[in-house]
Image: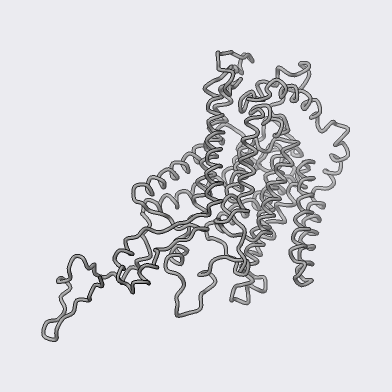
Amino acid sequence: MAISEPTGTRDEPFDPSAVPESEPRHRHRRSSHRPRTPRLYELCDWATEGVLYFMVVFGPWAYGTTQTWSTWTMNWAAFAIGALLLTKWAVRWRTGYQPVRWGQTAGRMRDEAQRTGGESKTSTDQSPTANLPSPAGRFLTLVLATLTGVVLSYCLVSSLNARATYDPTRRLFEFHDCLEWLPHSYDSRSTWFVFWQYLGLAFVFWAVRDWLLGKSRPERRTAMEGPPSTAAPALSDLEPTSANPRLPARLQRLFWVVCVNGAVLALECILQRLSGTGKLLWIRQPYWNTEAISQFGPFAYRGNAAEYLNLIWPVCLAFWWALRRVARFSPRRTVRAGSGPHVVLLPCAVLTAAGPIISTARGGALTATGGILLATALLLWRTRRGGWLSRVGVITLFLVIISLAGYLGWTQLEQRLKTIFTDEMSGRVELYQNAHKMAEDFPWLGSGPGTFGPLYQEYRAGLNQVWEVWAHNDWLETRITFGRIGLTLVLLMLALALGRWFAGGGIPLPRTAVHLMWVAIGACLLYARFDFPLQVYSILFVFILWCSVLFCLSRQPRA
């Protein structure tokens, strides 16, 4: 039933107080299609963003987060992000609020009101927002969430069902009774320490995903109201397609923080190496690797620094490529000429890509070189239909990276490459032989997460062999500590995170940018075959961060 407007006569002016309670006043001041976001929910989003940026910056600068104090600092920050995520879930449950998200259709179901000519306007105003995620994306999210809980439970059971506890002062194992058909640990302390790290990183993964998929206030306004009908829609009012690329504001801010922080870190690493100091950040001399050639920046081990930078520079290029496509559709001619803010990302990519080669870490340098060649080939392929100037620019970028890296780091790197086989990969051959024996003794359930170091002493052929803390092969170490069952679960989670892009219902991103992010992930997984990057919290954090971002993305729809 249509609601008539209250009117007055010439002698009796309209009295607002006479309006019945069923007819709310000033409805025109607020669009019926703009549900108010709960204040607590907005505060949680802001706090999540702030804590996330703190972790991005703190991780590498706190000496790579390789010490107990820095690890627990990151853990508590991750727990804070998890608490904020749980609070947001509670707000949704209590208020019924449904956030407007990327990759979901949001609306007020105005069809009924349009069909009835506005007669059901009152009931339509009370209808909930319809958020319809992609069925495939919803299924993959459910599976990955289940696997996350299973892997965390795997670690928790291993801690509670410990077979032994290692005493580092006496260098002895204290054995306990356990259920051997359940996951169990041969050092409960180490497994508990790893469990808390993985719990925090799980919070980070899902909190980042929840935050990135949510739209900012201007984006929510556009999604709810749509572009003005009296004017041509602006670029920011349109949904992202291959002909109209657009990046969410939150994703842009995250990329800017990571890329700029990585570039500053790479610059500090290079300057510290050139100064010849043996002190990390010119402040502290580490207990191990006291020589400058073995360090790189705040990392006491140059290989860890190289791999951290190898996770950054492909994303710098990916972000630059995405912003470059956005700039092509900008109405401002100055941006088209190449003077936009995205140009700043090219020096960032040059510094971070040259860093691994300058570090003289053989594995990191070879991985970086392979990644640079692959990224160059990918960019040349994507610009094959463009002008010759684009291809010349890509080749010039490649030459600048190689020239800078070669000028500052080739002399020392060349000497190390000559001994890559004669020194048995810095003694790794002997280490791998012992590690394979450990894998044979713990085939299915593993020895417990984090137990490789305490157990390795029992597999040395003699006391003259080095007591290694890491296997220098993350694939093999995961196979030893998690067993075949645990390793399979981890690989399934990784496959889901990387393959989510093929399903719909996420943040559309140019496929070239996604491929460059895959280069970063692939380089880390390849390097993990010969070293221990994923045992370092700062590196594992960025790896999980990129997996979370990739799990939010989807293929860009055609125009």
Residue at the extreme bottom:
10
Q: Nearer the viewer, residue 242 or 50?
A: 242
| Quarter of the figure with residue 537 | top right
In this image, 198 relative to 100: left or right?
right
Image coordinates for residue 174, horizontal then vertical, percent: 58, 13
Residue at (22, 76) in percent of width and height? 5
Image coordinates for residue 122, horizontal then vertical, percent: 29, 66
For the image, the number of numbered tags is 0
In this image, 106 relative to 28: left or right?
right
Looking at the figure, which quarter contains the C terminus? bottom right
In this image, 19 relative to 150: left or right?
left
Examine the rendered structure and indicate whether residue 191 appears above or below residue 73.
above
Residue at (41, 47) in percent of width and height? 88
Residue at the extreme left:
11
Q: Nearer the viewer, residue 467 or 164?
A: 164
Q: Nearer the viewer, residue 310 or 411?
A: 310
Residue at (58, 49) in percent of width and height? 551
Is residue 78 something one can see in this rendering?
yes
Looking at the figure, which quarter contains the N terminus? bottom left
| Quarter of the figure with residue 418 | top right
Picture colour scheme: one colour
Is residue 73 something one can see in this rendering?
no
Image coordinates for residue 29, horizontal then vertical, percent: 31, 70
Residue at (41, 54) in percent of width and height? 98
Q: Nearer the viewer, residue 552 or 118?
A: 118
Image coordinates for residue 212, horizontal then vertical, percent: 52, 53
